[in-house]
Image (cartoon, rainbow, N blue to C red):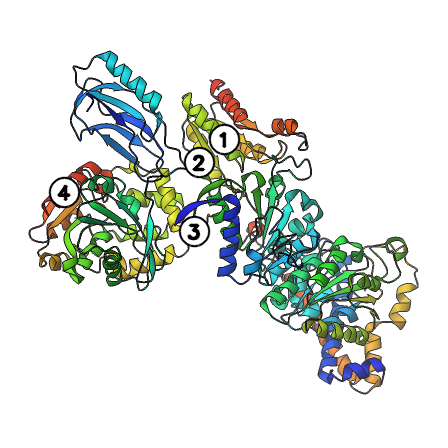
Amino acid sequence: MTRKITYQQAINEALAQEMRRDPTVVVFGEDVAGGMGTDQEKDAWGGVLGVTKGLWPEFPDRVLDTPISESAYIGAAAGAASAGLRPVAELMFVDFMGVCFDQIFNQAAKFRYMFGGKAETPMVIRTMYGAGIRAASQHSQSLYPLFTHIPGLKVVLPSTPYDAKGLLIQAIRDNDPVIFFEHKVLYTMQGEVPEEAYVVPFGEAAVVREGDDVTIVALGRMVHMAAEAADTLAAEGVSCEVIDPRTTSPLDEETILESVERTGRLVVVDEAGPRCGMAADIASLVATRAFEFLRAPIRTVTPPHTPVPFSPVLEDVYVPDAACVTEAVRSVTVRQFT
Amino acid sequence: MSDVQPVGMPKWGLSMTRGQVGAWIVDVGDEVSVGDDVVEIETEKINGVVESAVSGVVRRRVVDTGAWVPVGGLLAVVADPSVPEEEIDRFVEEFQAGFVPEEEDTEDGEAGPETVEVGGRAIRYARWGESGDPVVLVHGFGGDLGNWLFTAPALAERHRVYALDLPGHGGSAKNVEPGDLASLAQTLLGFLAVNGIDRAHLVGHSMGGLVAMAAALRDPRRVASLALIGSAGFGTEMDGAYIDGFVGAGSRRELKPVLQRLFADQGLVTRQLVDDVLKYKRLDGVGASLRLLADELFPGGAQRHVLAGDVGALGLPVLVVWGDRDQVVPPSHAANAPAGARVSVLEGAGHSPHMERANDVNRLLEGFLSGA
Amino acid sequence: MTADLQAASDVLTRQDLLRYYRVMRTVREFEERLHIEFATGEIPGFVHLYAGEEAIAAGVCANLRDDDYIASTHRGHGHAIAKGCDVRGMMAEIYGKATGICRGKGGSMHIADLAVGMLGANGIVGGGPPLVCGVGLKARVTGTDQVAVSFTGDGGSNQGTFLESLNLAAVWNLPTIFVVENNGYAEATSPMFHQAGIEIAKRADGFGLPGAVVDGHDFFAVYEATREAVERARSGGGPSLIECKVLRYYGHFEGDQQTYRDPDEVPDARANKDCLLLFERRVTGDGLVGADELRAIDGEIATLIDEAVAEAKRAPEPALDAVLADVYVSY
């Protein structure tokens, strides 16, 4: 049965259901119980934003608070996965990956290849990303392009509660290391989510709006900006197809290319920066594989090549919004190759 | 009753909040009668045709093809030719000024699906209509109660209508063991019992028709009539590849051509319809349950149970509806209908005429039920 | 009979002693032969030789079961052999061949075989300690008495990963053992310039876990210290740190001219501290094993390594499409 729950609840439910189904699923990270060692409430925090609250009381042996020691426990996830667990480690903010990146991209990502296909590393790293909560430069980045760059990793960024649950269950059951990006601004978003466990496969884009004039590829929170822009533009008679790739590795290239072959126009909306980011990557994909179908220059909508600013007025101008997308779409519908 | 009548955006299914105007079937100045097709509407889930609920002359087409209109929003105005133009304009103006689209989040007044326990399993169902003899709608293999979105509201005008999700389907429990026909029929009879329904008209589509027949054979006193649409149980032949394709498809690309076999007009298979079926198929337990049902009911791609003859012996009123372009269960099986059955083969319809030719099927059902 | 051997011989049989000698001799022969073969230019990339440190790998792994795990270093051949990796497959791997233990995709620094609990040599200094915390967690969560050992050099002991892992293993009370092979040089830099504090083992105190210093040339000393640590770990007593003081016989990597070392250091060690010599002296001196038995093993190992090198040279290169294989289980 389907009912409305939040993105955050969807993640919590996916964890709980998979832990019930599979005794090898373990959850650990900083404060994921947040209180398990005190005499007070045992899962006082349940994660810094409460996403894992309620798991510790049900699974006291499989939900573990860690030291603030990302290298050790992210590496432990890789070792545990090699030895037969399915760890879900929380790297609280993806900005912190700098202190443990070796364990992700030199260890977990490479085991299978380096060991001649004889290793499986079924681990998930859940992490928060994205601007919008006045958290400034070290707690607001959208660093998924860095992980997408690394062969051996799968990179997931759900934009809805439905996708959050299904993609997380897939991530846990998947036998490769998965980096699961959760946008903090989306935690309170509500949406229809089945009570049962289900999977959303990786590498399958969602078509959020169907349209004929312009293809908008948008990622994570930007999917909602793109959908809002598409609704605005529909009233002006511009029909936009909005595609949410849902996973950047693997990337559903086929759905993007097929759409652009129909519409002849592409706008990519990404909260990651403009250099070596997903917008540039997807623009390159279309330019190299579907150039002959393009009827206008490709436009990308991204933040500027700066750190995320703190000041609310600066952060608001930094993050792309629906108006930016609308303007970009208008520009490609006005300008056209002849 | 005012001389000026609106034609509004219908609501097909609980989740529909808006529809997109497709091709207009009538022009301004055309005379329409109750039941005439007015305009095609596409929604995220399904495409359909709006019928006129009134008779008169089409005086205005308020929206153009391509526009999105919320449920209840004004599409056209029908009035007697004698009504002056100014009055039509005033009607449109007042309607638009007073119209408040239904908020997506508020479902007040709308009864959502409910769940009952039948034989130890959670069974989801929905209800329409306040009075009249009970009618229970039983979907086919891989379907759910949502398949009846065009049917249930129409029948609800004169009946209490129930649609359930069979085990392994929709919002019901996803285990189907032992997965044989007897257990499905038992579930249907159990569903009648827990809802306090002594005797019901059963309407079944495809595998649902087979289940309805099996229930009638198990306990004939509980069944007032059988309406069987593109039904299984009339012969052994079927398109086994459809079943395998449906069970096996893991992606949109694989599933879409399979679902297109359900309809004569393949344009009806929208992306949303495919996505919704995929979402269902991706629920834990569904794959195994569908496989078990397929192996039990359609082993080797052929129908195991042929019940039409036995049902004939019950002497129940029976309606048989088939689309002449049904690619899943051969329309020639209509010839095996029980003696005395009303048989209607709809031209140009596929395996799901209740969705594809909803208005025609509704008229057949209403006519049959009023006589049954 | 020496005190070490007396203690050890309570649990060690003649067969055990012959087995451990065989392990050490295999490693030595493997590395000495690689030293020669590498100079021919036929081996791709670079190798880091373990010769001189054999007593540590053998002494530690002698206490481990097949279902226990180790995580190794860039100087990993000895650990791999001691944990039971196939020697012929290892040699083929070092030659980059399709028959290699990693199908030619890993090379010397990534030799691994999860089937025997070898989590991999590791090209990243300090890469291994966090991994064994994960294995320890697996044992804890699934209720087994498996243990996991990480090998780290003196260089690696300065990595944050090493210190973080001591802390994590202690707070989670994991069945893990952190073995530091202090061979006197972090690449080319002596402890005088890279290591604060005199003994790495003392760092254990700060995390509240037992730390021991042993002579890494002495199999029995390593064996005894590890035996204690493994017993503690298996019985729920948590992690330990063992620092083994040792000398490596070759440079940081093959080709290293070792201009930073006293020229007498290695000849002296080979003459006076060699683990194989010490081992032989003790076990033959005590009459447990005959020298002829050890020579017989030496002969078998020489043949094995000869064959392994010949096979590796003859073995097919990987098929070119292997470049695309095994990035993911599914993608």
Q: Are marks 3 and 4 in contact (CB under 8 Å)?
A: no
| Residue neighbourhood size for the residue with mark 3, other residues' Cα within 10 Å, grouped as few (<14), some (14–19), many (≥20) | some
Q: Which of C32 and B214 is in front in this view?
A: B214
The kind of secondary structure element at disc 4 is strand
Identify the residue shown where x is 20% and y is 39%. Answer: B157
User: Quick one: label 3 or label 2, which is nearer the N terminus?
Assistant: 3
The chain holding disc 2 is A
Amino acid type assigned to the residue bearing label 1 in the image: Ala
Q: Would you identify the image quadrant in which residue B23 lies?
A: top left
Q: Which amino acid does label 2 sit on?
A: Val
Badge 1 vs badge 2, beta-carbon distance below 8 Å: yes
Q: Which mark is residue A226?
A: 1
* Residue of label 2: A208
* Residue at x 74%, y 63% (from the top left corner): C151
- Residue holding disc 3: A195
> Callout 1: helix, strand or loop?
helix
- Identify the residue position indicated by label 4 in the image: B345
On the image, the x and y values in percent for residue C91 come to 68, 63
